[in-house]
Amino acid sequence: MRMRYIELAVGGFMILAIVALVLMAFRVSGLAMNTSGETYTIKARFENLGGLTERAKVSMAGVTIGKVTKIYLDPEWYAAVVEMEIDKSMSTLSIDTSASILTAGLLGEKYIGLSVGAEADYMADGDWVQDTQSAIVLEELISRFMFSKAEES
Amino acid sequence: MINRIAAIGRYGTASIQSIGRAGQLLLNSLLWGGPGSAGFSDLIKQIYSVGVRSLSIIVVAGFFVGMVLALQGYNILVKFGSVSALGTMVSLTLLRELGPVMAALLFAGRAGSALTAEIGLMKATEQLSAMEMMGVDPLKRVVTPRLWAGIISVPLLALLFSTVGIWGGAFVSVDLLGLYDGAYWGNMQNTVIFYDDVIQGLIKASVFGLVVTWIAVYQGYDSVPTSEGIGKATTQTVVISSLAVLGLDFVLTAVMLGSI
C-alpha cells in the first residue's frame, strides 16, 4: 500500500516535469499556439519592415488591439506583406485606416500603429490596408544627413 | 615548528586521500549490478524521498525568485524604456542560471543533508557492516539508487523551478505592474532557443545533481560513526556541495558559451 503511494507520487512528479518541459517548448521558447480570443485578420504591404517581427503588437492611439501573425515577401510587388490579427472588439476600423511601422522609444522594439480614417465603411476579415508607411531606418536617416552635410561644405 | 609543518602536511595528504576515496566511491557505485544490487523499486523510493519531497520548497522558492526578478528587472528596465525586454530577462536568467543553481542549492540543503545523515546513521548502527557480512555490497545496495535518484531528480526540479519562476514573473509584470502580456511572452519566445537555453540548463542541472548527491553520500559513507561525526558530516555536505555547485556553474557556463 505504501509502495503504491510512492509510485503514484513519483509518477506524478515525472508527469509534472514533462508538462513543464512542454510548456518550456511551446510557451517559452516560441513554438507558441494561438491562445487569444476572437480575432479577425487584416493585411498591409510595406516597402521596408526595418526589424518588425512576428508577434509584434498592433496598436491604435497607443492602445494594443492586436498582433502581427505572419510576415512574408510578395513576389509580385517585391514588398513585405504583414498579416495582423485584430481583436473582434475593435471591428469598427474604417476602410481608409492607415498603418505605419513605429518604434517604441528610440531603440525599442518595432510595432504597427494604426490611425483612423474618415470613411463610414468598416474593414472586414482579409481586407488590405491601403495607406501604409514604412519603418524609419535610423542608419539611412543618419547617412542621408551626413551626405547632405558633406555636400554643403 | 617542525610539528606544525608536519601537521600541514598531514592535513594535505588527508584531503587528497579523501578525494581519492570519494573518486573510488563514485567509480564503484555509479553502475548497477553486483551481489545484492538495488532494484528498480529502490530507485523509485529514492526519487520519492529526494525528488518528490523537495517539490514544495522548489515550487515556492521558484515562484518568489521569479517574482522578485521581474520586480527588480522592471524597475531597472523602465529607466531605459525597454520594459519589453523583461520577459526575456526573467526567462533567460532562470533557464540558464538560477533554475539549475537554485534547485541544486535547495536540493543540497533539503535532500543532500538528509542523505548524509541517513547513510551516516546506517554506518553508526553498523547496518553497512552487516550488509557486507551478508555478502551484499553496500555501495551497490545503498549508494547507487541514491546517486541516480539525484541525477534524475535535480534536472526535473530545476525545470519546475524555472517554469514556476517564469509564471511568477508574468504574474508580477503583467498582472501587478501592468506590462502588456504580448511584450512579456512575445519577446521571450523570440529570444529563448529551446536547444540552447532549455536543454543546456537541464544538462547543467544533471551535473549538479550528480555532484551534490555524490558529495552527500560520500560524506555520509566516510563520516565518523558518532552523533557528533554525523552532525559534522551533514554540515560539510551542505557547505562543500554549495561551493561545488557555484564553482562548477562558472566552469560549465564558460564551456557552454564557449567564450573562454
Image: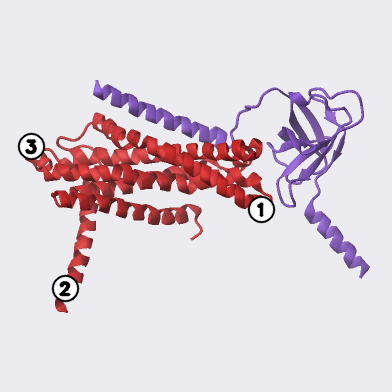
- Between the C-alphas of marks 2 and 3, the distance is 41 Å
Labels 3 and 1 touching (C-beta < 8 A): no
Q: Chain of mark 3?
A: B
User: Which tag is nearer the camera, tag 2 or tag 3?
Assistant: 2
Residue at the front extreme, as displayed: B176
Q: Looking at the rendered structure, which numbered label has been put on residue B134?
A: 3
Q: Looking at the rendered structure, which numbered label has been put on residue B94?
A: none
* Closer to us: B50 or A124: B50
Q: Color used for chain B?
A: red
Residue B29's spot in the image, x, y percent?
A: 22, 44
Residue placed under numbered mark 1 in the picture:
B79
Residue placed under numbered mark 2 in the picture:
B6
Q: Amino acid at mark 2?
A: Ala
Q: Chain of mark 1?
A: B
Q: Amino acid at mark 1?
A: Lys
Q: Chain of mark 2?
A: B
Q: Is residue A60 above or below residue B250?
A: above
Residue B27 in view of the camera: no
Q: Amino acid at mark 3?
A: Met
Residue A108's spot in the image, x, y percent?
A: 71, 48
Q: Say which quadrant the N terminus of chain A sits in.
A: top left
- Side of B22 where A140 appears, left or right: right
User: Which tag is nearer the camera, tag 2 or tag 1?
Assistant: 1
Residue B19 in view of the camera: yes
- Side of B102 where B225 appears, left or right: left
Residue A121's spot in the image, x, y percent?
A: 89, 23
Residue at the top extreme, as displayed: A1
Q: Which chain is purple?
A: A
Q: Earlier in the sequence, mark 3 or mark 1?
A: 1
Colour scheme shown: by chain
